[in-house]
Image: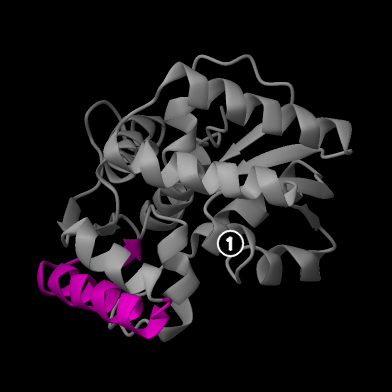
Amino acid sequence: MIRSNHVSHIGIVAGTADGAALCYRTLCHEAEHLTGRHAHPEITMHALPLETYLNSIDAEDWVGVAALMSRSASVLAQAGAELIICPNNTLHRAFEFVTSSVPWLHIAAAVAAEAAYSNYRRLGLLGTQAVMQGTVYQPVLEPQGIEVLLPEASEQRLLDRIIRTDLIRGHYPCASRARVADIVSSMAARGADAVILGCTELPLLLEDEKPVLPMLDSTRILAAAALHRAVPRMAVAAHPLVFTTN
């Protein structure tokens, strides 16, 4: 039985290096609002070679992707994790097939809670093709009356190429930043209230941009939501945590 003052051990199923690192840093730094200086929860991360994920993704083998995620979950459970998160949006396409003895927090559920709190009703969605056209965000947001707005087809292809060619390798060229900023501007012109950064490296690409729309940073929102789940209610009430969304 979890005691009222027990802080849960958080497990991270890593996908890409930079996205997982950003999530880990956010957990450590934002925890100070809840638990005090340098007092972040116990955190364990497990990473399989990204190549193994990409091979299954390219083959559209989502059961295979889930098997890899489940393998990481098993390692984290053995390490004592009590809550698991995955700071990778594309991998959530396989979420329904994951098996785990430890509860997970879905990245889209965390973003949806933030969107509802901010009363956003029309959200642009940026990410890989698998995220934009898949079953990661739409089934979570649309039942809540939140419309999902996608980039134009050519913009989707460009964005997917930028993510796969640059971002997952830790490269953030100015040309890619400008192109993504243009996509955000086009979504603003189409009436989006805010934009979901549905790739965990996009906030790193856009960190020096002055946004034309509010950005829902899925990586940091997931980390903040995990902290709310992991830290005792008494601590949360005493030290409220504000989601980091820019």
As shown in the figure, which amino acid type bears the numbered disc 1?
Answer: Ala
Above or below for 95 versus 217: below
Observer-nearest residue: 170 or 161? Answer: 161
Task: Give the image location of residue 135, x and y in percent.
Answer: 61, 72
Residue, far front:
154
Range of the magenta residues? Answer: 60-85
| Image position of 89 (left or right of 191) | left
Q: Is residue 235 visible?
A: no
Above or below for 90 versus 37: below
Quadrant for the N terminus, please: bottom left
Res 25 → quadrant: top left
Residue at 19 percent across and 77 percent down: it is 71
Q: Is residue 16 visible?
A: yes
Instruction: Count neighbours of disc 1 (C-alpha within 10 A) and say few if under 14, some if 14 to 19, many if 20 or more.
Output: some
Residue at 32 percent across and 29 percent down: it is 171
Residue at 63 percent across and 14 percent down: it is 210
Observer-nearest residue: 227 or 139? Answer: 139
Magenta span dominant secondary structure: helix
| Image position of 209 (left or right of 72) | right
Observer-nearest residue: 73 or 9? Answer: 73
Magenta-span inclusion, residue 181: no
Q: Mark 1 points at which residue?
A: 109
Res 104 → quadrant: bottom left
Magenta-span inclusion, residue 68: yes
Above or below for 142 versus 235: below
Task: Give the image location of residue 29, x and y in percent.
Answer: 32, 30
Residue at 30 percent across and 30 percent down: it is 36
Q: How many labels does the image show?
A: 1
